[in-house]
């Protein structure tokens, strides 16, 4: 591994200036190259139907990139394996605007099937019967690229592996023998047509002990790939480590490479001297790249590639691959455009003058989405008849929001991206001196975070900020601001290999912890006796619990507010006509 560290050091500060200026903001893109090796991997995970991503790059552009990238790698006499680790649905109109969800988006995803080598599912493919059925019949069944070692589907009354238990194959160029297995984490909210067996139980089964371990060993496997919807990060990777202990006892000399997902972060973990693990973000924002020198003492290299035109152009140029003609729409891009039209996703409903972040800015910042909501959006909730003169406090749970709001048009699609939940507004009339303490109570409860119908998919379960990350950020704060301000905003990931994993130099986007709930109040100077405490029915029980805890003696019963979700309020706020007035105000 020492040699590897040396190689890495050579690459520190080798960010190359490629495209000087672009877009309307003179952003400077500085990239560092991918170090290809014997075997190379590209990894996507948690794409959540962002088949056109926030950088304007679509699944068709990615198709062109993969083809060209593969040609470049293979012409160097090296191998490429392309992997996805699931959670393909929930999060974007192209999947969510249809009934059932994902009935059209899977077709688009699968148009890249030729470029993929290994696929599996995530927990989002298992919430509803329709999601699992679409995935099983259209993607997993009879597809020798689809591997899932611990999930089954009830196919015509028979419990059948969701895909296949494992895959053994040889690479295209150097005929390396690859064994691939795939595990989903111990997910328990699967629908009745499916079942998930936890890893610790699955590896006790006959197929694992007999078929797999008796058939395969260090002699007939050059590399073992374990890919799946499985968390790799330190402190949360107990299942992975348990699996690894078993595998390593058997494959003592084989490289074991893990590809994980679920928590939507970029991370890379060194497991032992022949094994590492990568997690590659979310929402088609990241391509995870890993290359391995398969010598007796293997070395590993990782990069998190931004899913942008600039990154794609840069890496294809370095590899001497074909350039992507961004003006030409291939059959996938055309299909996506078509779906956007059919589903009316680009219908413009308003304009977002600048990007609002969920976690990328502190709650007090004018660019924080929750700050915007509490200061300017919640007050747009219309009062029911007869309650016009009553003061109110309006509260939302922050888990309701699933995506940043990006500068540009507020479209039909934005509604799906920002929040898919249909929770209803309710209120309870209570003395102000009780109401004003409810939010404080809710913010001390961990249960409210866990109540979501679907887990929040935008806020990563934040990785604790490492000391090295803090040092990096502080160092950056001191550096010339002008320079920093012209870099694209993005993550700076510090992982087991250091802080140089990004392929694109970013102005660091930080992650700030948000409270469980935020509120708007129109009560000034405690001047009222009673208020309508307005909340979403999703956390009603928590509101009642708060009142009980405070020994409130009145009747605890919520009344409907005849409205649902925060999305119509956001739409109203960003509506072009109203924007003119809103712009006069500042978010304090
Ligand atoms: Zn996900």
Image (spheres, grey):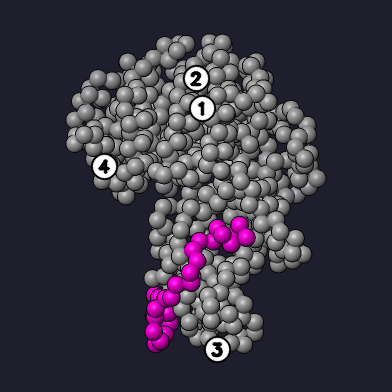
Side of 16 where 454 appears, left or right: left
Specify whether tag 3 is near ligand 1 (CB below 8 Å): no
Mark 1 or mark 3, which is nearer the start of the sequence?
A: 1
What range of the chain is rendered magenta? 544-572
The image shows residue 132 at horizontal and vertical percentages of 34, 39
Mark 1 or mark 2, which is nearer the start of the sequence?
A: 1
Q: Dot 2, crowdedness within 10 Å: few (<14), some or many (≥20)?
A: many
The answer to whether the residues at label 1 and label 4 have Cβ atoms under 8 Å apart is no
Distance between mark 2 and mark 4 Cα atoms: 35 Å
Residues 514 and 538: in front is 538
Task: Let me know if residue 506 is in the magenta part.
Answer: no
Q: Which residue is mark 1?
A: 42
Distance between mark 3 and mark 1 Cα atoms: 61 Å
Distance between mark 1 and mark 4 Cα atoms: 31 Å
The answer to whether the residues at label 2 and label 1 have Cβ atoms under 8 Å apart is yes
Distance between mark 3 and mark 4 Cα atoms: 53 Å
Which of discs 1 and 4 lies nearer the camera? The answer is 4
The answer to whether the residues at label 3 and label 4 have Cβ atoms under 8 Å apart is no
Which of discs 3 and 1 lies nearer the camera? The answer is 3
Mark 4 or mark 1, which is nearer the start of the sequence?
A: 1
The image shows residue 428 at horizontal and vertical percentages of 46, 78
Quadrant in the picture for residue 549: bottom left
Q: Which residue is mark 4?
A: 193
Q: Residue at x 53, y 38 (%)?
A: 342
The image shows residue 571 at horizontal and vertical percentages of 61, 57
Secondary structure, mark 1, is strand
Q: Which residue is mark 3?
A: 529
Q: Which residue is mark 2?
A: 80
Which of discs 3 and 2 lies nearer the camera? The answer is 3
**Residue 154 in sight from this viewpoint:** yes
Secondary structure, mark 3, is loop
Distance between mark 2 and mark 1 Cα atoms: 8 Å
């Amino acid at each position: 591994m020492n040699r590897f560290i040396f190689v890495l050091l050579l690459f520190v500060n080798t960010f190359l200036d490629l495209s000087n200026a672009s877009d309307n903001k003179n952003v400077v893109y500085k990239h560092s190259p991918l170090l290809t090796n014997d075997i190379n991997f590209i990894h996507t995970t948690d794409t959540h139907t962002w088949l056109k991503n926030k950088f304007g790059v679509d699944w068709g552009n990615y198709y062109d990139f993969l083809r060209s990238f593969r040609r470049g790698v293979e012409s160097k006499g090296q191998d490429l394996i392309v992997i996805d680790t699931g959670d393909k649905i929930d999060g974007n109109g192209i999947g969510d605007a249809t009934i059932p969800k994902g009935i059209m988006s899977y077709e688009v995803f699968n148009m890249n099937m030729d470029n993929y080598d290994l696929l599996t599912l995530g927990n989002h493919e298992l919430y509803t019967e329709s999601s699992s059925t679409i995935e099983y019949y259209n993607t997993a069944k009879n597809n020798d690229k689809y591997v899932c070692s611990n999930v089954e589907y009830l196919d015509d009354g028979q419990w059948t592996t969701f895909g296949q238990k494992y895959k053994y194959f040889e690479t295209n160029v150097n005929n390396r023998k690859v064994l691939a297995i795939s595990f989903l984490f111990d997910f328990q909210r699967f629908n009745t047509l499916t079942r998930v067996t936890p890893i610790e139980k699955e590896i006790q089964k006959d197929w694992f002990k007999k078929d797999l371990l008796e058939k395969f060993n260090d002699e007939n496997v050059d590399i073992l790939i374990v890919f799946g919807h499985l968390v790799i990060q330190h402190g949360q990777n107990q299942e992975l480590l348990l699996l690894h202990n078993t595998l390593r006892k058997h494959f003592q000399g084989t490289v074991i490479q893990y590809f994980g997902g679920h928590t939507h972060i970029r991370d890379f973990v060194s497991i032992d001297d022949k094994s590492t693990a990568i997690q590659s973000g979310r929402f088609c924002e990241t391509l995870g790249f890993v290359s391995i020198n398969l010598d007796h003492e293997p070395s590993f290299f990782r990069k998190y590639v931004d899913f942008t035109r600039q990154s794609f152009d840069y890496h294809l140029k370095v590899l001497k691959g074909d350039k992507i003609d961004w003006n030409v729409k291939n059959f996938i891009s055309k299909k996506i455009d078509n779906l956007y039209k059919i589903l009316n996703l680009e219908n413009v409903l308003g304009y977002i003058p600048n990007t609002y972040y969920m976690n990328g800015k502190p709650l007090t910042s004018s660019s924080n989405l929750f700050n915007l909501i509490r200061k300017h959006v919640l007050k747009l909730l219309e009062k029911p008849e007869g309650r016009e003169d009553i003061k109110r406090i309006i509260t939302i749970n922050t888990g309701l929001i699933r995506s940043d709001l990006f500068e540009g048009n507020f479209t039909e699609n934005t509604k799906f991206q920002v929040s898919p939940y249909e929770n209803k507004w309710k209120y309870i009339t209570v003395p102000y001196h009780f109401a004003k303490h409810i939010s404080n109570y809710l913010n001390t409860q961990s249960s409210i975070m866990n109540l979501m119908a679907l887990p929040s998919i935008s806020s990563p379960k934040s990785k604790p900020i490492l000391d090295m990350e803090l040092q990096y950020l502080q160092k950056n704060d001191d550096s010339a601001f002008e320079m920093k301000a012209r870099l694209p905003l993005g993550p700076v990931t510090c992982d087991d290999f250091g802080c140089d994993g990004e392929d694109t130099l970013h102005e660091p986007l930080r992650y700030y912890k948000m409270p469980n709930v935020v509120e708007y109040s129109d009560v000034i100077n405690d001047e009222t006796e009673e208020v309508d405490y307005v909340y979403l029915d999703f956390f009603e029980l928590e509101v009642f619990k708060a009142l009980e805890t405070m020994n409130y003696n009145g009747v605890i019963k919520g009344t409907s507010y005849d409205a649902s979700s925060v999305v119509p309020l956001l739409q109203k706020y960003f509506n072009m006509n109203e924007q003119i007035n809103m712009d006069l105000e500042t978010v304090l």
